[in-house]
Structures are given as structure tokens and as C-alpha cells.
Image (cartoon, rainbow, N blue to C red):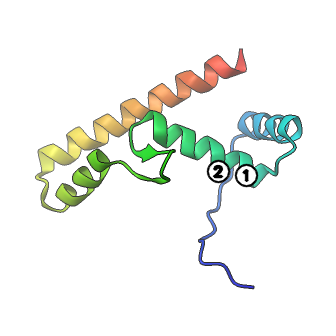
Amino acid sequence: MPTRKKRVGFIPREEVMKIIEKLSIENNLSNSKIISILVEEALFERGIFNKKNGKATQSYIKIKENSDDMSEGHIDLHTYKKFLSFLKFQEMMEEYNK
């Protein structure tokens, strides 16, 4: 039976895959389900996703709507904010590995 959900290819680093596999065994869930949960948690922490209703947050929707008419300077600022979010995620993963 076909599904309306799109598949996403994900090739994690070796250490990340070890973490995913460990979480999968500990929680008796598939790797795909663990990755799905981790992605939702990361988006929630960045203020992009509301876990309670399963939808994008209003602030993210407004940013997305305004992104079409951004000037070059705003795109750099937006990219910089995404980079800071990525650094925060890396810190969280390093903390988890300790």
C-alpha cells in the first residue's frame, strides 16, 4: 500500500549511527523511528516545530513566508542563525556522548 509520506535519505557519521543503534535497542524502536524522534526534538529545541500539535510554529511560518523577498543581507543573517543552531545541536550531541 503506497504511503503519502516521503522517504528521506540519511547517512550518519559512524559515531552518530552507534548512538542511534544504542537508542534503538534500549527503546525497542526501529532506527527510523529513533531518527524521526531526534529530528522532531531538534526542531522543537530550535523553535521550529510544536511537538504537541505536530505542526510548524507560527514564528517559523512567518520566517518562511518572508524568505522569498529577503535581501542578500537578510539571507546571510538567516544562514548565520541556522549555523548557530547547528553549533548548539553539536554541543547537545557532545554532551550526550559524555
Q: Could you tell me which secondary element the residue under label 1 belongs to?
A: helix
Question: Is residue 69 placed above or below 77 in the rendered structure?
Answer: below
Residue at the limit of the structure toward the top, as seen here = 98
Q: Which mark is residue 3?
A: none
Q: Could you tell me which secondary element the residue under label 2 belongs to?
A: helix
Image coordinates of residue 26 in percent, x first then y, are 87, 34
Q: Residue at x 27, y 45 (%)?
A: 59
Residue identifier under label 1: 33
Q: Residue at x 12, y 60 (%)?
A: 69
Q: Three-letter amino acid code at disc 2? A: Ser
Question: What crowding class fits label 1: few (fewer than 14 Cα within 10 Å), some (14-19), or many (20 or more)?
Answer: few
Q: Nearer the viewer, residue 65 or 53?
A: 53
Q: Residue at x 21, y 59 (%)?
A: 65
Image quadrant where one finds the N terminus: bottom right
Image coordinates of residue 24 in percent, x first then y, are 83, 42
Q: Is residue 50 left or right of residue 58?
A: right
Q: Residue at x 29, y 36 (%)?
A: 80
Question: What crowding class fits label 2: few (fewer than 14 Cα within 10 Å), some (14-19), or many (20 or more)?
Answer: few
Q: Is residue 25 left or right of residue 2?
A: right
Q: Nearer the viewer, residue 28 or 69?
A: 28
Where, by quadrant of the figure, is residue 81 drawn?
A: top left
Residue at the limit of the structure toward the bottom, as seen here = 1
Q: Is residue 45 left or right of residue 28?
A: left
Q: Three-letter amino acid code at disc 1? A: Lys
Question: Is residue 96 placed above or below 64 in the rendered structure?
Answer: above
Residue identifier under label 2: 36
Image coordinates of residue 34 in percent, x first then y, are 72, 45
Question: Is residue 14 placed above or below 32 in the rendered structure?
Answer: above
Answer yes or no: do the residues labelled 2 and 1 have beta carbons within 8 Å? yes
Image coordinates of residue 82 in percent, x first then y, are 36, 39
Image quadrant where one finds the C terminus: top right
